[in-house]
């Protein structure tokens, strides 16, 4: 009998694991259980993702999907603008040519989440996925899975939870549950930004436009089909966003005004994104404790958000999830090919995953704490100094680097441009007011 594995969840992590095991040339029976009733039953799969060289991109290469991925990866999507509430751009990172970026160590091309999932779905054998299977419970002793439709499956040699924030596999390993992060938001879309709003399209560029001020965040991202995803994030109670969406129902204009009331003194250039968007979805953000771990239990494991849920403010979630799948697949492949202890292989994966997850969680928490401050744009740019130095393998506290005040220099540089932008907006308001008053006198 082949080794049997049940993967709960057909998101990026579950599908990546399934694909990697499928191409591993080992004697294994793979079953993926997915709560969606079909590949197209969910109207929205989310926004755009930046895949990193040593995590998401490495998993695609190992899965034999690099040639297919290149058809969808958007290296021009690496363009990034960081601005404050006055629409003052403090950082503009321009994309590199694809020919150079593909071989670059720090290349982070974008791909729509829906496109990534579709590509992974097409790469696995359709018969290994069972759709419409909402996991209800697991008997931790027998390993029998019970689904909402009263059907059962198992036992399996290994059950892997790739079922996200509210994983039904996680309780078998730990009683820790996700906690509300203190941040919730509204996501929406603009379909024809190039044709209908050319000036706004130019303002965005080819990638992302992030605005941080007053303990709030406003983000705009270009998708692969040239549509735009807009998100407004605020520090409110957990039900604020969902209550607002329910209250206004189909009255999107009323909802927009409610949302924009949180950004009343922000630049009109930023308001226009919200005013032009539609299809609002409430999104409260949850997270698991930094450094969470569990005692290993034979026959079970977790990957992705099920193992270490984070907010999206460092872009690490899907990359960490795909890296989990990559490392677990390699551990299982090695154990099966060498007839070694598979349970020990899973434990070895966990022992390596825990510190790696903690690193990403700390990075995400650092970004979140910087973004949601009064001077979020400047503070976020200061955190970028740490992020860049970490990725390049430098310790700013050691050697001659410890004598260079990189963070202070970044703070002063960003604050200077912020001051100019704030002054420019004030002068613009005064000029517009004087023109209006002059017109009134003439009338």
Image (cartoon, rainbow, N blue to C red):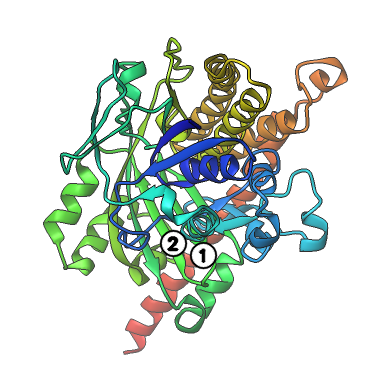
Please identify the quarter of the rendering in which residue 8 is found.
top left
Please identify the quarter of the rendering in which residue 109 is found.
bottom right
Percent x, y of residue 203: 56, 68
The correct choice, above or below, for 184 with respect to 385 in the image is below
Distance Cα–Cα, label 2 vs label 1 = 7 Å
For mark 1, what is the residue?
223
Residue found farthest to the bottom: 443
Residue found farthest to the right: 400
The correct choice, above or below, for 118 with respect to 7 in the image is below
Percent x, y of residue 213: 46, 44
Please identify the quarter of the rendering in which residue 268 is found.
bottom left
Residue 442 makes an appearance in the image:
yes
Residue placed most toward the observer, 160 or 178: 160
Left or right of 94: which side holds 11? left
Residue at 34%, 83% in the rendered image = 441
**Disc nearest the viewer among 2 and 1:** 1
**Which sits earlier in the primary sequence, circle 2 or circle 1?**
1
Percent x, y of residue 259: 27, 55
Percent x, y of residue 178: 32, 27
Residue 423 makes an appearance in the image:
no
Left or right of 273: which side holds 245? left
Marker disc for residue 229: 2
């Amino acid at each position: 009998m082949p080794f049997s594995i049940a993967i709960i969840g057909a998101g990026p992590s579950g599908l990546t694991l399934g694909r990697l095991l499928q191409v591993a040339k080992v004697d294994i029976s793979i079953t993926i259980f997915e709560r969606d009733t079909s590949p197209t039953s969910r109207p929205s799969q989310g926004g755009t993702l930046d895949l990193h060289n040593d995590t998401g991109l490495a998993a695609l290469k190992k899965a034999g999907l690099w040639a297919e991925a290149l058809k969808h990866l958007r290296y021009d999507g690496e363009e990034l603008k960081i601005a404050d509430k006055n629409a003052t751009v403090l950082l503009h990172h321009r994309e590199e040519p694809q020919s150079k970026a593909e071989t670059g160590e720090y290349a982070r091309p974008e791909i729509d989440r829906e496109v990534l999932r579709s590509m992974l779905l097409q790469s696995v054998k359709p018969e290994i996925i069972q759709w419409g299977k909402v996991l209800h419970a697991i008997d931790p002793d027998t390993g029998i899975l019970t689904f909402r439709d009263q059907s059962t499956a198992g036992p399996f040699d290994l059950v892997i939870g790739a079922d996200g924030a509210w994983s039904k596999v996680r309780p078998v390993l730990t009683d820790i549950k996700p906690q509300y992060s203190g941040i919730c938001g509204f996501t929406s879309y603009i379909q024809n930004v190039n044709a209908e709003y050319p000036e706004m399209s130019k303002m965005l560029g080819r990638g992302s436009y992030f605005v941080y001020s007053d303990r709030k965040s406003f983000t705009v991202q270009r998708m692969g089909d040239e549509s735009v995803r807009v998100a407004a994030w605020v520090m409110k109670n957990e039900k604020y966003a969902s209550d607002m969406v329910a209250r206004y129902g189909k009255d999107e204009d009323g909802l927009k005004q409610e949302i924009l009331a949180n950004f009343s003194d922000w630049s009109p250039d930023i308001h226009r994104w919200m005013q032009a968007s539609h299809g609002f979805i409430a999104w409260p953000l949850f997270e698991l404790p930094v450094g969470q771990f569990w005692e290993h239990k034979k026959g079970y494991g977790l990957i992705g958000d099920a193992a270490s849920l984070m907010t999206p403010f460092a872009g690490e979630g899907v990359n960490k999830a795909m890296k989990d799948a990559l490392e677990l697949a390699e551990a299982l492949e090695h154990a099966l090919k060498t007839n070694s202890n598979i349970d020990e292989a899973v434990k070895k994966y966990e022992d390596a995953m825990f510190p790696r997850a903690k690193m990403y969680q700390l990075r995400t928490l650092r970004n979140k704490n910087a973004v949601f401050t009064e001077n979020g744009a400047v503070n976020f740019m200061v955190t970028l100094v740490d992020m860049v130095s970490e990725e390049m393998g430098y310790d700013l506290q050691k050697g001659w680097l410890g004598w260079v005040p990189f963070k202070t220099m970044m703070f002063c540089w960003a604050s200077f441009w912020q001051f100019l932008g704030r002054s420019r907006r004030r002068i613009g308001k005064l000029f517009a007011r004087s023109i209006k008053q002059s017109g009134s006198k003439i009338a």
